[in-house]
Image: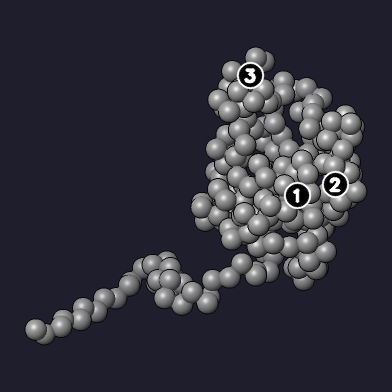
Amino acid sequence: MRTVVKHFILTDPLAQQNFGAMTHPSTNTRNRPIIAGQAALLVIDVQNGTCGPGEASRRPEFHTALTARVVPNIEKLLQGFRAGRLEVIYTVMENLTADGRDRSLDYKLSNMGFAKGSREARVLDAIAPRGDEIVLPKTSSSVFNSTVLDYLLRNIGIEDVFVVGCLTDQCIDHAVKDGADRGYYMTCVHDACAAGTEARHEAALDCFRGYCRMLRTDEVLDILSKT
């Protein structure tokens, strides 16, 4: 039997680019420079209702990580991204309705969510949004499921998303995996995230590290300095 080899030509430039990436996977890497207009810092759920002083007694290990590590590192990252005129986007758990009927079933069953416009739904003062930085109210663990984040990122032209905030094993996990599935280059800045305990934080990082690049705050700042 004769073997017939068919040859084909890709005429579309985008198709050629995608085919090249598939046949030469070494050209695809998460170790990318930060490009102006194409990178965003995503700050997830660092708000009064979940990260306020009351957590010191309710979740002391979480509160210690938050105050000693997470918030100071987010402050540094905000300074770096803003200095580079890069996009900063926040999410907060906040109902769209007064009675919370718009929340996901999981949020209803878990009694999660905060009233629209409430103090609990506001970002901590130390890392509060500035100017016209975007704040997205969300009513599910995944920011990609209950907000228009994907739509916004594509409109703005964002390719790289740097994720920080709370909780590592819940909303951070969802953001990283869902963002990766949607075609974004995801980076978890792991020392700017926290879970209920350090053990849960580390376990979550091990769980989703295959979906993203893992960097420390100082490593991100070093990349920013070369932008």
Q: Is residue 93 above or below residue 215?
A: above
In the image, which disc is placed on residue 100? 3
Q: Nearer the viewer, residue 204 or 8?
A: 204
Residue, x 61% and y 67% (percent of image)? 30
Res 160 visible:
no
The three-letter amino acid code for the residue at tag 2 is Ala
Viewer can see residue 202: yes
Asked which quadrant contains residue 101, the reply is top right
Amino acid on which disc 3 is placed: Gly
| 10 Å crowding of disc 1: few (<14), some (14-19), many (20+) | few
**Eye-nearest disc, 2 or 1:** 1
* Mark positioned earlier in the residue sequence (2 or 3): 2
Disc 3 crowd, CA 10 A, few/some/many (<14, 14-19, 20+): some
Q: Secondary structure at mark 1?
A: helix
Relative placement, left or right, of 29 versus 7 is right
Q: How much space separates mark 2 and mark 1, taking CA atoms?
A: 12 Å
According to the picture, the residue beneath numbered tag 2 turns out to be 65
